Image: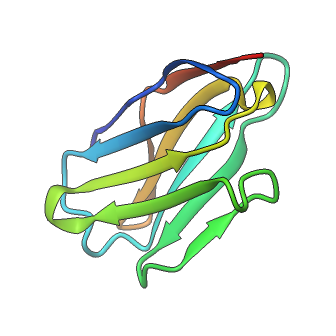
């Protein structure tokens, strides 16, 4: 399974970006898909995830600003990021667990300028 993340870029504080993660396999039965982020020198951290029932989970830092969703017909997961802050600057990775195995996308860089 391959995951292709895209949508990162440079945005001013307060702006918005939408990240996409396209899977090479069907995500209909995938129980967990999530977005993580990482900055140099720090551990990768969960930002948001969406479970098979459609229930979203958010890190405290993302609550109220980010929204995760999935389109099973397009095998795609999204992360809508609003009210971006400089501290959101990171490489964002998508992750999916397919038949008990974890797969990672290649990462997409989000840079938020102050």
Q: Which one is nearer the viewer's eye here, 28 or 15?
A: 15
Looking at the rendering, in which quadrant would you find the C terminus? top right
Note whether 23 is above or below 53 in the view shown: above
- Is residue 61 in sight in this rendering? yes
Q: Which one is nearer the viewer's eye here, 105 or 9?
A: 9
* Direction bottom: furthest residue: 53
Residue drawn where x is 80% and y is 34% of the image? 43
Within the image, what quadrant is residue 109 found in? top right
Within the image, what quadrant is residue 54 found in? bottom left
- Is residue 102 in sight in this rendering? no
Q: Which one is nearer the viewer's eye here, 17 or 35?
A: 17
Q: Where is residue 72 in the image (x, y as percent from the top left)?
A: 23, 67
Residue drawn where x is 54% and y is 59% of the image? 67
How many tags in the picture?
0
Q: Is residue 95 left or right of residue 92?
A: left
Residue drawn where x is 35% and y is 69% of the image? 30
Q: Position of residue 34 (x, y in %)?
A: 52, 55
Looking at the rendering, in which quadrant would you find the N terminus? top left
Q: Is residue 33 left or right of residue 37?
A: left
Residue drawn where x is 48% and y is 43% of the image? 94
Q: Position of residue 104 (x, y in %)?
A: 46, 40
Q: In this view, does 112 lie to the left or right of 92?
A: right
* Direction front: furthest residue: 14
Q: How is the image coloured?
A: rainbow
Q: Which one is nearer the viewer's eye here, 66 or 6?
A: 66
Within the image, what quadrant is residue 12 found in? top right
Q: Position of residue 65 (x, y in %)?
A: 66, 53
């Amino acid at each position: 399974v391959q995951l292709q993340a895209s949508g990162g870029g440079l945005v001013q504080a307060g702006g918005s970006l939408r990240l996409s993660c396209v899977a090479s396999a069907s995500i209909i039965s995938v129980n967990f898909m999530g977005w993580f982020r990482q900055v140099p020198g720090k551990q990768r951290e969960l930002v948001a995830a969406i479970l098979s029932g459609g229930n979203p989970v958010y890190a405290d830092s993302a609550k109220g600003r980010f929204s995760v969703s999935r389109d099973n017909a397009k095998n795609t997961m999204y992360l809508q990021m609003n009210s971006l802050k400089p501290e959101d600057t990171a490489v964002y990775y998508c992750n999916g667990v397919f038949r008990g195995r974890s797969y990672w996308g290649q990462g997409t860089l989000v840079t938020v300028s102050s």
